[in-house]
Amino acid sequence: GQQVMQIPQYQHVQEGEDFTTYCNSSTTLSNIQWYKQRPGGHPVFLIQLVKSGEVKKQKRLTFQFGEAKKNSSLHITATQTTDVGTYFCAVPNSGYALNFGKGTSLLVTP
Amino acid sequence: EAGVAQSPRYKIIEKRQSVAFWCNPISGHATLYWYQQILGQGPKLLIQFQNNGVVDDSQLPKDRFSAERLKGVDSTLKIQPAKLEDSAVYLCASSLTDGTNQPQHFGDGTRLSIL
């Protein structure tokens, strides 16, 4: 199935700084989903991107799907301590399910 | 709406013992997934059900893991015998239908420790 690489693996920022995580695939994707998992919690669906070049915003979060549909990014503007957690991208495998990336763990210090 | 329910939340067993986990998906969700999440990694799909049929179990270690969803609603995942490397969080998720464009809703998971 499709595999994705997420970078960086970890990011430590000061509250108020911006944060970006990237998800890269070697093959064209039909769609990509993003999830957030708080420490000790379970993954929570954030958004799905389907169209080439698509940009979606959720308050301080901006999600982009690359023109070639091989990469995606999640950008958080002015991080807050509530943004702490691990952000996963998930892409279709060869069947009907998703393959999750290894995630980017974000730590925000006040 | 009620979320995905899982039990137990925590389980500690010794290697070679058996263990079972239970999941009740969101009402009306036809697709149910079991994932294994090892510390520091993303969830890894073990098995996917569509109603009471298996869609994908290619990554399920079938010599020790088994799962069923007999009536197309709740599901159980069993490990017998457990190995040290099975220590992980076992997550259940459900979605309205199958297909990779469906948001998945996760339960709180069962944290399994093998001694």
Image: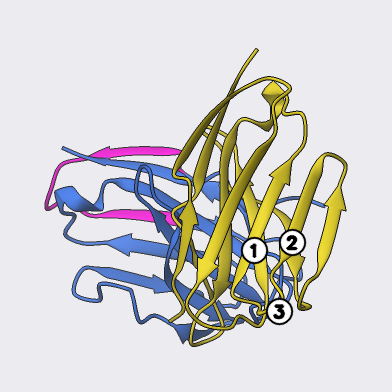
Chain colours: A yellow, B blue
Is B17 one of the magenta-colored residues?
yes
Q: Secondary structure at mark 3?
A: loop
Which chain's residue wears label 2?
Answer: A
- Asked if residue B70 can be seen in this view, the reply is no
The residue carrying pointer 1 sits among few (fewer than 14), some (14 to 19) or many (20 or more) residues within 10 Å by Cα, namely many
Please provide the residue range marked out in magenta.
B8-21
- In x, y percent, where is residue B25? 64, 61
Asked if disc 1 and disc 2 are in contact, CB closer than 8 Å, the reply is yes
In the rendering, which numbered label is found on residue A93? none
Tell me which amino acid carries mark 1: Ser
Q: Secondary structure at mark 2?
A: strand
Residue drawn at the location 60% of the way across and 77% of the way down: B72
Q: Earlier in the sequence, mark 1 or mark 2?
A: 2
Residue drawn at the location 62% of the way across and 71% of the way down: B73
Residue drawn at the location 38% of the way across and 43% of the way down: B40
Question: Quadrant location of residue A9?
Answer: top left
- In x, y percent, where is residue A20? 63, 44
